[in-house]
Image (spheres, rainbow, N blue to C red):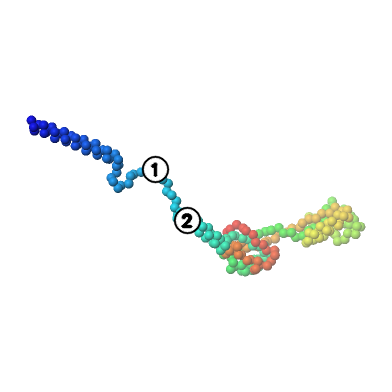
Amino acid sequence: MFFRLLFVVLIALNIAVGAWLLLGQNETHAHFATDPGVPKLRLLSELPAPAVTSAHTAFVVASASAATNTSSSASPNALSYACMALGPFATQEDLRIARNALGSQVQRMRTRQEQATQTKGWWVHLPPSPNHAMALARARQLGAHNIQDYFVVGSGDNQNTVSLGLFKDPANARKRRDDIDAAGFQVQMSERTETVLEYWLDLIPVDSNHFDWRSQIHDPGIGLHSTGCF
């Protein structure tokens, strides 16, 4: 009987100890999800945004300032690249002389020629008459008004026209026209043109900003303008 009672007591104690161990350990683990000393796991979305340190800000500002200063200091010394056309030259010899004179300032060049219409002068005249007799009659009328220096064109495209002079200077041509117009005659002023060859030098200077071509080419009729690259 004693042993049976002892056996029952031992079983009860085992049950009590087991219950204490089971319930006591669960409560402890409820407070500590990880082992002591190990940081608790957190989601990335739960982390606060990283603060920008003053040192990092100073580095970014200094870098931007250095880049700006570098760009500004490099600009004045940067070489400028451009394609240009120099001309027109009246003869191939003029073109050859210019090419030799500018060789040291140019990294690439080529020559070309073009046809151009050029003013040859200004012609003052009366309109053509229907026939030669009427042209002569109009010429006599001019003489009656003390107008000299005229002649009647007897053939060609301007047949039966009374010519009053050819002028290089348009101002002189206009004066002649106005004087005859004031005498009561219907007078005309026409530009005379001719087709000529012009010679050009296309070039790429070593430095367009410091291309001193005027020190070598003194002809005021020569100019420089930008053109397509070649």
Residue name at image x 81 percent, y 60 percent: 172
Please give left or right for residue 88 compared with residue 35 in the image.
right
Instruction: Place residue 224 in its image quadrant.
Output: bottom right
Query: How far is disc 2 from disc 1 in space, using C-alphas?
Result: 29 Å
Task: Name the quadrant of the C terminus.
Answer: bottom right
Q: Name the residue under label 2.
A: 58
The image's mark for residue 46 is 1
Task: Name the quadrant of the N terminus.
Answer: top left
The image's mark for residue 159 is none
The x, y position of residue 35, in whole percent, is: 28, 45
Callout 1 crowding tier (Cα within 10 Å): few <14, some 14–19, many ≥20: few
Callout 2 crowding tier (Cα within 10 Å): few <14, some 14–19, many ≥20: few
User: In terms of secondary structure, where does tag 2 sit?
Assistant: helix
User: In terms of secondary structure, where does tag 1 sit?
Assistant: helix
Q: As drawn, which residue projects farthest toward the front?
A: 2
Q: Which amino acid does label 1 sit on?
A: Glu
Q: In the figure, 58 relative to 210: above or below? A: above
Q: In the figure, 9 relative to 71: above or below? A: above
The x, y position of residue 217, in whole percent, is: 66, 67
Q: Which of 113 and 224 is in front in this view?
A: 224
The x, y position of residue 177, in whole percent, is: 83, 56
Q: What residue type is labelled 2?
A: Ala
Q: Which of 102 and 159 is in front in this view?
A: 102
